[in-house]
Image (cartoon, rainbow, N blue to C red):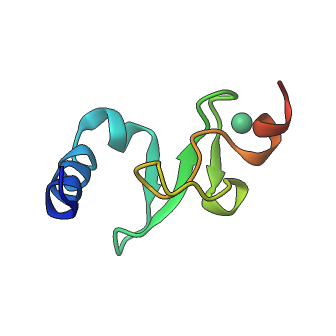
């Protein structure tokens, strides 16, 4: 898969209800909060570590949950 195709898949994934249900955006459509996949709480994106492999470029688990194993 080339870069262009990857971006298309990413853009499509960002429009699915599942994706949107786990994100909060401000009035400008900027991502502000993500629902942590472990504690199920909405947290500011600053609470999530960066991960280039993930769709937002951020981890799915918050930093706190990341530390719990
Ligand atoms: Zn968490």
In this rendered view, identify the residue nearer to me: 66 or 43: 66
User: Disc count in the image?
Assistant: 0
Where's residue 58, x and y in %? Answer: 55, 54
24 in relation to 32, above or below: above
Residue 8 coordinates in the image, percent (x, y):
15, 56
Residue 33 occupies quadrant: bottom right
Residue found farthest to the bottom? 28
The residue at the far front in this view is 1
- Work out whether residue 11 or residue 17 is closer to the camera in this orientation and state it: 11
Is 52 displayed left or right of 38 in the figure? left
Considering depth in this image, is 60 or 7 the residue closer to the camera? Answer: 7
Q: Tell me if 55 is positioned left or right of 64 in this view.
A: left
Image point 46% across, 48% down: which residue? 54
Q: Quadrant of the C terminus?
A: top right
Q: Is residue 31 left or right of residue 64?
A: left
Quarter of the figure with residue 51: bottom right
Q: Position of residue 26 (x, y in %)?
A: 43, 67
Nearest the eye: 38 or 25: 38
Question: Residue at 85% across / 29% down in the picture?
Answer: 68
Which residue lies at the image location 19% right of the left edge and 48% below the top edge? 9
Where's ligand 1: which quadrant? top right
On screen, residue 22 above or below 7? above
């Amino acid at each position: 898969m080339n870069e262009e195709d990857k971006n298309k898949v990413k853009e499509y994934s960002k429009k699915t209800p599942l994706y949107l249900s786990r994100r909060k955006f401000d009035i400008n459509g900027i991502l502000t909060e993500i629902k942590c996949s472990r504690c199920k709480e909405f947290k500011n994106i600053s609470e999530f570590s960066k991960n280039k492999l993930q769709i937002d470029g951020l981890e799915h688990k918050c930093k706190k949950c990341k530390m719990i194993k």
